[in-house]
Image: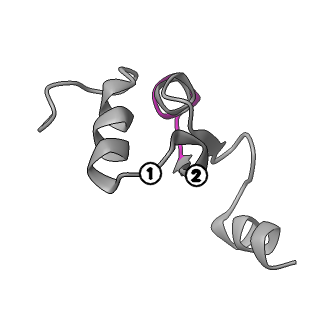
Amino acid sequence: EQCGALKPNPSVFRAALADLRIAPSTLLHVGNRPDTDGLAARAAGCRTLILGTDFTSFRELWALFVS
């Protein structure tokens, strides 16, 4: 809301990327809604993982990165 947009508008992610001064490909957004989180992040060029689609628990998500 602070940047004047809500997901699925990708400007939410573009504003965060600009603030962090990072490339979209370096940001991984972990969300729970493919219709808002997934659409917005991908439209901004970011990678996404969606709870219930790409992983079912945060324990499982953790295992994806430490194994």
Q: Give the range drawn in magenta.
A: 31-37
Residue 64 in the image: x percent, y percent? Answer: 80, 66
Residue 34 among those drawn in magenta: yes
Q: Quadrant of the C terminus?
A: bottom right
Q: Residue at (71%, 64%) from the top-left corner?
A: 61
Q: What residue type is labelled 2?
A: Thr
Q: Residue furthest right?
A: 67
Q: Residue at x 79, y 74 (%)?
A: 63
Q: Which residue is outermost to the bottom?
A: 66
Which structural element holds mark 2? helix
Which residue in the structure is indicated by mark 2? 26
Q: Residue 67 carries which label?
A: none
Quadrant in the rendering for residue 1 = top left
Position of residue 23 in the picture relative to residue 58 (left or right): left
| Residue 25 pos. (x, y %) | 60, 43
In the picture of the structure, the residue carrying the numbered disc 1 is 22
How would you rate the neighbour count of disc 1 (Cα within 10 Å): few for under 14, some for 14-19, many for 20 or more?
few
Horizontal and vertical percent position of residue 7: 35, 27
Instruction: Name the residue at 33% across, 55% down.
Output: 20
Quick check: marks 1 and 2 in contact, CB under 8 Å?
Answer: yes
In the image, taking residue 66 as reference, residue 14 lies left or right, namely left
Q: In this view, does 67 lie to the left or right of 66?
A: right
* Element class at badge 1: loop
Q: Residue at x 31, y 43 (%)?
A: 18
Real-space Cα separation, disc 1 to disc 2, in angstroms: 7 Å
Identify which amino acid the numbered label 1 is placed on. Ile
Closer to us: 35 or 67: 67
Q: How crowded is mark 2: few (under 14 residues within 10 Å), some or many (20 or more)?
A: few
* Residue 59 within the segment the image draws in magenta: no
Q: In which quarter of the image is residue 45?
A: top right
